[in-house]
Amino acid sequence: MSKRILFALFLSTLLLGPALGQTRFTEADLSFTVPEGWTLREFPGLKYHVAMGPVEGGFATNINVVDESFEGSLEEYLGLLGQSLVQYLKDFTILGEGPFVTDQGLEGYKVVCTDNQNGMDIAQVFYVFNKAQRFYVLTSSVHPSYLEAYIGIFDAAMESLAFP
């Protein structure tokens, strides 16, 4: 399991920024519709831009993307990801999980959880997709008290995911 995924999770607790306009996240190998009013920002050390939403409960709502190659199935990858999350995230608790399908029929997996990073409680939704042994983890993060309000927004963004 790559430490880049854990690093991106850690960064989700540090990112703050204003929301301005709607756009489409488009990188060389994937794209999705950014929630209305959100912005895209570069962050040192990350391959992909981070979609930044409003600050809610003192936390900058965001969606970040990491990818890595892995020579195994989605189920095997999810098992290793789960082990890493339990090992490295304090108070990691799964609230729900199951298959997730995009508007284009891409099949992935969704995990909704809470954890604590740097003394801050966070709710996160992991969307995991495999494309030709390259695994993409799109992590949506929000203050836990706003999870219910944002879960549909996160799902809509991920439903628009495409691999050009």
Image (cartoon, helix red, strand yellow):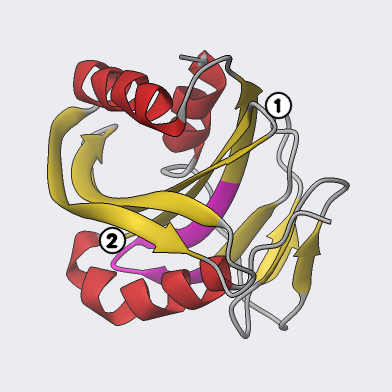
Q: Tell me where residue 69 sits by quadrant.
A: top right
Query: x%, y% of residue 125?
Result: 35, 54
- Which amino acid, by three-letter code, is at mark 1? Gly
- Which amino acid, by three-letter code, is at mark 2? His
Residue ID at (71%, 82%)? 22
Residue ID at (22%, 16%)? 87
Label 1 Cα neighbours within 10 Å, binned few <14 / some 14-19 / many ≥20: few
Label 2 Cα neighbours within 10 Å, binned few <14 / some 14-19 / many ≥20: many
Give left or right: position of 76 versus 94. right
**Which residues, given as a range, are shown in magenta?**
53-64
Relative depth, front residue between 5 and 128: 128
Query: x%, y% of residue 157?
Result: 56, 72
Residue 86 visible in the current orientation: yes
The residue labelled by disc 1 is: 45
Does the magenta stretch mainly form a helix, a strand or a loop? strand
Residue ID at (23%, 52%)? 97
Query: x%, y% of residue 111?
Result: 29, 49
* As drawn, 92 above or below 23: above
Q: Tell me where residue 40 sits by quadrant.
A: bottom right
* As drawn, 115 above or below 71: below
* As drawn, 57 above or below 163: below
Q: Which mark is residue 143?
A: 2
Marks 1 and 2, Cα distance to the nearest angstrom? 24 Å
Relative depth, front residue between 82 and 45: 82
On whether residue 93 falls in the magenta region, the answer is no
Q: Which mark is residue 121?
A: none
Earlier in the chain: of badge 1 and badge 2, it is 1
Question: Which quarter of the rendered picture does the C terminus lie within?
Answer: bottom right
Asked if the residue at tag 2 contacts the one at tag 1, i.e. Cβ–Cβ closer than 8 Å, the answer is no
Give the residue furthest to the right: 28
